[in-house]
Structure formats: C-alpha cells, structure tokens
Image (spheres, rainbow, N blue to C red):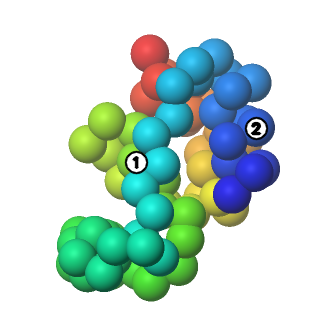
Amino acid sequence: CQRAKALLRQRGVAQIEEIRIDLDPVARDHMMEITGRRTVPQIFIGATHVGGCDDLIALDQKGGLKPLLA
C-alpha cells in the first residue's frame, strides 16, 4: 500500500521489507495463520502486528506509531 509506505517514510523509516504473498502461497498461508486476516497489506513493526493500512494510520493518529518505531 503506497499510503502505508508514505506514512512510514514520513516517520523516518528508511527500509521497508515487502513480502509478496501474491507470488508465494506458503508465505500467504503463514501470514493468514499469524494474523487471521486475508487482506494486504499486513504491517509488522518488528514482531508487532499493526494490521492494515487503516490500522497503521489510526495508530499514528493516536500517537502510538512513533513509540513503536523508536
């Protein structure tokens, strides 16, 4: 999601790892197993599952994104 990447870059994230689950069925099954979700993107900061783009934006608006990135 371009919006998620743009927000992360605005918050100082220089490197974003993307896992293309549309090209890797094993990775897709693993993502669904650990998140319980089928939609993309599913955003992780370290080991913390943030959720999708809307979840990331909501976390930022509540002031929770910057501490998670620290």
**Residue 48, above or below 22:** above
**Residue 68, above or below 30:** above
Q: Earlier in the sequence, mark 2 or mark 1?
A: 2
Q: Is residue 58 visible?
A: no
**Circle number at residue 11:** none
Q: Amino acid at mark 1?
A: Phe
Q: How far is disc 2 from disc 1 in space, using C-alphas?
A: 15 Å
Name the side, left or right, on which 54 lies relative to 52. right
- Percent x, y of residue 16: 51, 35
Q: Residues within 10 Å of mark 2 (few under 14, many from 20)?
A: few
Q: Residue at left 77%, top 50%? A: 3
Q: Residue at left 75%, top 24%? A: 10
Residue linked to disc 2: 6
Q: Secondary structure at mark 2?
A: helix
Q: Secondary structure at mark 1?
A: strand
Q: Residue at left 32%, top 45%? A: 48
Q: Quadrant of the C terminus?
A: top left
**Circle number at residue 44:** 1
Instruction: Point out the residue furthest to the front here.
Output: 23
- Percent x, y of residue 23: 43, 73
**Residue 26, above or below 47:** below
Q: Amino acid at mark 2?
A: Ala
Q: Is residue 66 visible?
A: yes
